[in-house]
Image: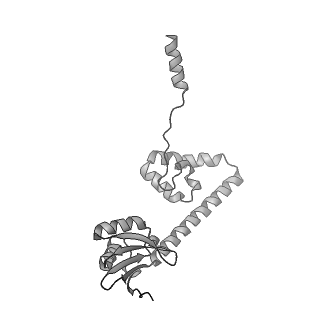
Amino acid sequence: MATEASEADNALSEPQARHVIYCGICTLPPEYCEFGGTTKKCREWLEKNYPDMHEKLYSEEAIAATLSTLSVDAQKRAAKDAQKKEAKAAAAEARAAESKAQAQVLIKRVERNKRKFVTAVSGLEAHGMDLKKVAKEWGKKFATGSSVTKTASGGEEVVVQGDNSDEIFDWVVDVAGVPEDNVECIEDKKKKGV
């Protein structure tokens, strides 16, 4: 009887594992999302995926309770800092959207040997695409070899064996959602070695 009581006490005193939720945007716990720089997106993600935790962290009562513990000067600074962070995040988002709208995707058809061609595509990373995944998908879609190579200028491009420039143009416009005005097809001939 005494051993059962001591076992119950030991079971209660052992620390239990905690289930911690991590933000899908900044990968921090939601309590710390405000320090990640993507607060607005994090709040939207939390509201969509964990509405009860969003209510607990961002309800009017929770914000008022947090602000009430601060001094008047600290409250003013917190409000000012929050406005600065929101303005900074909005400006960064606008810059990213503008650079994405201006980014060009170049599709080059390069002649290798007489009738053999290679299609090189650069500028996809500016539109948020993972080049390795794109290369793998194109390799399967066109049943050819496809890889990511470094260019002389230091960037990266996807090289697909064969003349697939028209199909790649269609894929970039339809699947990737890049505007047609931002996609340019170029025919390039390699110079013979001297």
Q: Position of residue 156 (x, y in %)?
A: 47, 73
Q: Judge whether 49 appears above or below 37 on screen.
A: above
Horizontal arrangement in the rendering, residue 87 relative to residue 110 (left or right): right
Q: Judge whether 147 appears above or below 115 on screen.
A: above
Q: Residue at x 30, y 76 (%)?
A: 167
Q: Judge whether 175 appears above or below 80 on screen.
A: below
Q: Nearer the viewer, residue 158 or 7?
A: 158
Question: Would you say residue 56 is visible in this rendering?
Answer: yes
Q: Judge whether 1 appears above or below 166 on screen.
A: above
Q: Position of residue 166 (x, y in %)?
A: 30, 79
**Residue farthest to the front?**
194
Q: Position of residue 82 (x, y in %)?
A: 61, 59
Q: Position of residue 90 (x, y in %)?
A: 54, 67
Horizontal arrangement in the rendering, residue 87 relative to residue 132 (left or right): right
Quadrant in the picture for the C terminus: bottom left
Total labels: the figure holds 0
Q: Residue at x 57, y 62 (%)?
A: 86
